[in-house]
Amino acid sequence: MDADLLTAIISRWIHVGTAIVLVGGTTFLRFVVHPSLQESDTELMGRIRARWKKVVHAGIGLFLLSGIYNYWKAIPLHKGDGLYHAIVGTKIILALVVFFFASALVGRSAGTQKFRDQAPKWTLIVVVLSFVIVAMSGFVKVRPLPAPPAAPEQISLPSGGN
Ligand code: HEM
């Protein structure tokens, strides 16, 4: 198999696999772990966060590596396709926002403590934004491609009359 094709397939596996683990894990945290914990379980929550943090940091790294590679490979295929770049560009900005919230939720700095104090609310925001990102990514993947601009020799010019 051609090396370029193999890299593209592996990059997609990494990207989609990371989405499954991170979005699934965050959904589990929000809808199973948070409601099962009591106010007094702060130590347990601290231990869960310390472990989840490693997954979040590795996932952000993998998302950035595979996402930048995917985009770099997609650019030549979508020349002049403004809608594609608008959707993927917005998706990348949203992903950076999600990375910030997800890092704040597992972080330890005083500046991000307000996110951890309201962890169920911010975790829900991460889940909702992640699903929006998945929806945008899925849409650009399956939407019909716009017709390529006609090649210059196919454009019929009015005949000169002689
Ligand atoms: C929360 C973070 C992210 C999630 C949940 C996510 C999810 C996804 C999913 C589900 C796909 C569809 C894959 C497929 O159908 O084959 C995809 C494709 C893609 N992602 Fe991401 N992604 C995230 C972050 C990023 C980042 C940070 C970048 C770039 C820096 C990026 C760039 C791309 C590109 C270029 C594609 C291919 C779009 C196409 O079909 O042409 N993604 N992403």
Image (cartoon, grey):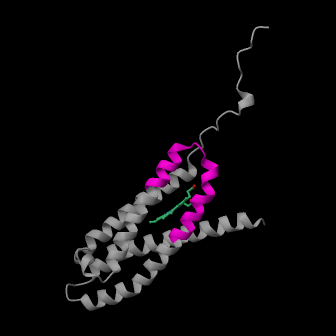
Q: Is residue 116 visible?
A: no
Q: Up-down: is 1 above or below 104?
A: above
Q: Up-down: is 105 above or below 94?
A: below
Q: Nearer the viewer, residue 131 or 117?
A: 117
The answer to which quarter of the image holds residue 2 is: bottom right
Give coordinates of residue 87: x percent, y percent: 47, 50
**Residue shown at 71%/31% (left/top)?**
152
Span highlighted in magenta in the image: 63-90
Assess whether residue 52 is covered by the magenta stretch: no
Q: Which quarter of the rendered picture does the N terminus lie within?
A: bottom right
Residue 158 lies left or right of residue 135; in this view the side is right
Residue 68 lies left or right of residue 108; in this view the side is right
The answer to which quarter of the image holds residue 124 is: bottom left
Residue 69 lies left or right of residue 131; in this view the side is right
Give the overall secondary structure of the magenta segment: helix
**Residue shown at 56%/53% (left/top)?**
141
The answer to which quarter of the image holds residue 97 is: bottom left
Give coordinates of residue 69: x percent, y percent: 59, 64
Q: Which quarter of the rendered picture does the C terminus lie within?
A: top right
Give coordinates of residue 53: x percent, y percent: 40, 82
**Residue shown at 56%/43% (left/top)?**
81
Give coordinates of residue 21: x percent, y percent: 48, 74
Q: Nearer the viewer, residue 71 or 33?
A: 71
